[in-house]
Image (spheres, rainbow, N blue to C red):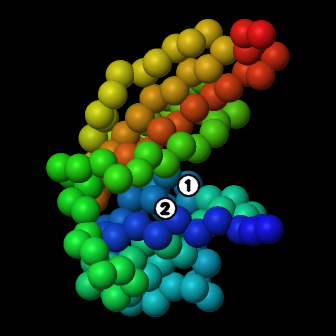
Amino acid sequence: MATKVFINLPVKDLHKSKTFFAGLGFSFNPQFSDENAACMVISDSIFAMLLMEPYFQTFTRKAICDATKNTEVLIALDAASREEVEQTIARAKELGASIYAEPADQGWMYQHSFADLDGHQWEVAYVDVSQMPG
């Protein structure tokens, strides 16, 4: 059974991507980072590998998706509160992200979304399990 998750994302400019995500509060594990890759720590067991596009291409025979034009994956992260969702979205926007959807409020779940500098879509959601409908 897997104990860790590594999400691999192609990026055009590793330095700009690292600056963007560091601005959102993420750290990087230097042990798994170099001029081609940066290991972004999402949690103790979840990581996003930001890989320069030419390096990413060495892992696949398929063409790399242009995330500014096509969606291949939606990455969803949890938040501790509705306020944290909005703070994260506001900060992402300040750092150059685009907002691709309006916030959705289900009462028990609140989510909002942004696309990073390379167009990868990130959803940030607060879920109040005690208010979930039966």
Q: Residues within 10 Å of mark 1 (few under 14, many from 20)?
A: few
* Looking at the image, residue 134 lies above or below residue 104: above
* Looking at the image, residue 103 lies above or below residue 38: above
Residue 111 appears at what percent x and percent y? 52, 27
Q: Amino acid at mark 2?
A: Ala
The residue lying toward the viewer, choosing from 36 and 20, is 36
| Quadrant location, the N terminus | bottom right
Q: Are marks 1 and 2 in contact (CB under 8 Å)?
A: yes
Left or right of 120 in this view: 26: right
* Looking at the image, residue 7 lies above or below residue 25: below
Q: State the residue position of label 2.
A: 22
Which residue corresponds to the image point at 34% horizontal and 75% vertical from the top-left?
A: 14
Which residue corresponds to the image point at 37% horizontal and 46% vertical from the top-left?
A: 121
Residue 46 appears at what percent x and percent y? 66, 62
Tell me where residue 40 sits by quadrant. bottom right
Q: Amino acid at mark 1?
A: Gly
Tell me where residue 110 sits by quadrant. top right
| Quadrant location, the C terminus | top right
Left or right of 115 in this view: 110: right
Any part of residue 80 in sight? yes
Q: State the residue position of label 1.
A: 25
Marks 1 and 2, Cα distance to the nearest angstrom? 5 Å
Left or right of 130 in this view: 52: left
As drawn, the residue found furthest toward the left would be 69
Q: Residues within 10 Å of mark 2 (few under 14, many from 20)?
A: some
Which residue corresponds to the image point at 23% horizontal and 50% vertical from the top-left?
A: 70
